[in-house]
Amino acid sequence: MATAPTTIEPKSRVVFTQGGKGGVGKTAFASMLVEWYQNQAIPLTLLDMDTENKARGSLTHFFPTARKINMHVPDGLDAFVDVLEEGNPIVVADLGAGGGAAVQRWFSSMFTSVAQLGVTFTAIGVVTPDPASVESVLSWGHALQDNVHYLIVKNAIVDPADFSYYENDPGAYEFRRTFKPQEITMEYRFPKVEHPARQHGLTIGSVANRTPAVPELQKATVVLRAQAYRRNLFEELDRVKDLLLI
Amino acid sequence: MDPDLEELLKDLPGRRSRLEVHREFVLRLHRTGRSYRQIQAILARKFDIQISTTALFEFIQRRSRPRITPGNPPPAADQAYRNPLDREEPPWPIPRWTKEEIEAMRAKARASAHKPTTVPRRPPVFHYDPTRPLTNRPPDDKEINK
């Protein structure tokens, strides 16, 4: 884990997916993360900052209560703090592709003051076998430095998945050595589960609970797969819950 | 002074209050809480002495001060009060700061009075060069230990 950004007693936490490379599974992971919080009855506020993603791929599509925020306006990321004043101690924000410069500017000007309020941050970087996803994580690490805790999600978008760029590149090694991020794995998900669920705006959890009235998602194998995905990822999240709770 | 005038002063009788003969009685009345007006009335009734309140007040005040008498001599010169600051060597140890220590304390005070209001930015702990292509080749031991 990175060095604690502040000695102030933490009172709330903002968990956000790093923007950058698109299509690496940020929103897919974010939706599973939200279900993990909901499974433990932890109150949280959802921010959908992916203004470029089309409706079917955004966090709002899976969770209509998520608030759409444009992070590219000058004070867009102030929403991190504004929603904390409403009382929920946890904020989950799904950032869109790009946005690194906006986040860097915001942290540069606001981090010290926000940290004084007891707000801590967890940045979620999603890496895939694609080296561009690793480059994105490294550039965000350069921007955020040790102001946040890092959680790296190895998303197996193919089977078998090869994360050798993240594991072997000297820059990535330096990133791991410096920030000591926690790492979890998101296993490969079959298209027969992933695609219709996304198309209908359904989370893996709802498929696992057989709630949707979508025939192709009510097949036993699909439900069992969804249950396995949820169970395995929840176990991974339980392992790193220090980065996700206050 | 002219010797004749000094001779004249010697022959003049000393100024003595009429109350002097009743001095102890008057002071005791005062000490036991009688007011000046009550003492004034007592003196008039008992001794037929008419005296103003102001004169009575001055008499009592003057006689109430400690008097230098053969039984109560003044303090000797070496026991008299002296300002401690006038002493060359104080009777108690005083820490002596060196000039360097004093200047260091002044510099510290100046620095605290001009503290910056902003927290200096921490130097970056991680640097990433986006122009360098990534590699998935496992590093050898030399690279790791570099």
Image (cartoon, grey):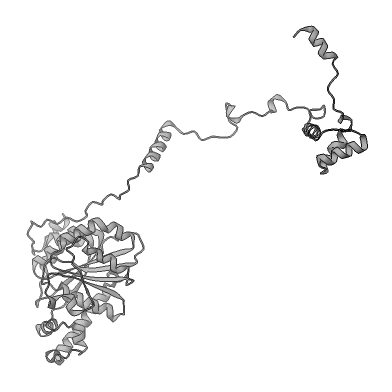
Q: Is residue A50 above or below residue B119?
A: below
Residue B30 locus on image (x, y percent): 82, 40
Q: Quadrant of the C terminus of chain B?
A: bottom left
Q: Quadrant of the N terminus of chain B?
A: top right
Report which quarter residue A109 is drawn in. bottom left
Report which quarter residue B104 is drawn in. top left
* Nearer to the camera, A175 or B32: B32
- Does residue A173 show up? no
Residue at image x 14%, y 74%?
Answer: A25
Q: Is residue A175 left or right of residue B104?
A: left
Q: Is residue B138 above or below residue B100?
A: below
Report which quarter residue B48 is drawn in. top right
- Does residue A109 show up? yes
Residue A188 locus on image (x, y percent): 13, 79
Q: Is residue B102 above or below residue A108?
A: above
Q: Is residue B84 left or right of residue B28?
A: left
